Amino acid sequence: MSDPYYADVKQWKMDYDRREMVLFANHRIPKTCVCGGPITLATDDKEKSYYECIEYEDDGLHIRHPCFHAIEEELEELKKKVAEEASRRMNVEDEMKKMREDIKLLKELCIEDDGLHSRQRCFDAIEE
């Protein structure tokens, strides 16, 4: 025999988990609702736009996210990504500059003739 209270606790946990997923889903532009339903663009009586689940009910278990906030959040995420890419590009450019200097130094060392040995072969290997 199972405890009748167990079924209630299990349902409460499922509801809590679902509400938690909805809470985290209300960030950026949603693709699908927690319930699995598609997201559409809807407006309310005050002409405010929302990303909303087709099966939306005001029970806290479906997504209804204002467009303005979603687009703002998406833009902030994109700004962060652009800043990271710019930083990476600067690092790569600095590394390339250092490599060019190293190659120039190696070429100078390879062309150097000490009177006994010709180091021209080293220079040919660098160009390949």
Image: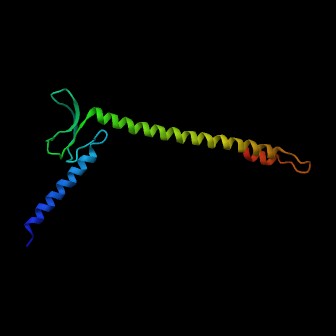
Q: Can residue 128 be seen at all in this image of the molecule?
A: no
**Picture coordinates of residue 91, whole percent (x, y):** 58, 42
Please state the horizontal and vertical placement of residue 50, each as a whole percent of the image: 23, 34
Residue name at image x 25 percent, y 47 percent: 23
Question: As drawn, is 54 to the left or to the right of 112?
Answer: left
- In the drawing, does residue 5 fall left or right of residue 100? left
Camera sees residue 11: yes
Q: Is residue 111 positioned above or below 13 on the image?
A: above
Residue at screen point 31% across, 40% down: 28
Q: Is residue 31 above or below residue 7?
A: above
Please identify the quarter of the rendering in which residue 65 is found.
top left
Name the colouring of the figure: rainbow
Can you name the residue that lies furthest to the bottom here?
1
User: Which image quadrant: the C terminus?
Assistant: top right
Q: Nearer the viewer, residue 106 or 128?
A: 106
Which quadrant: the N terminus?
A: bottom left
Q: Where's residue 87, x and y in %?
A: 53, 40
Q: Quadrant of residue 60?
A: top left
- Residue drawn at x 23%, y 30% is 49
Q: Position of residue 100 (x, y in %)?
A: 69, 41
Q: Residue furthest top?
A: 47
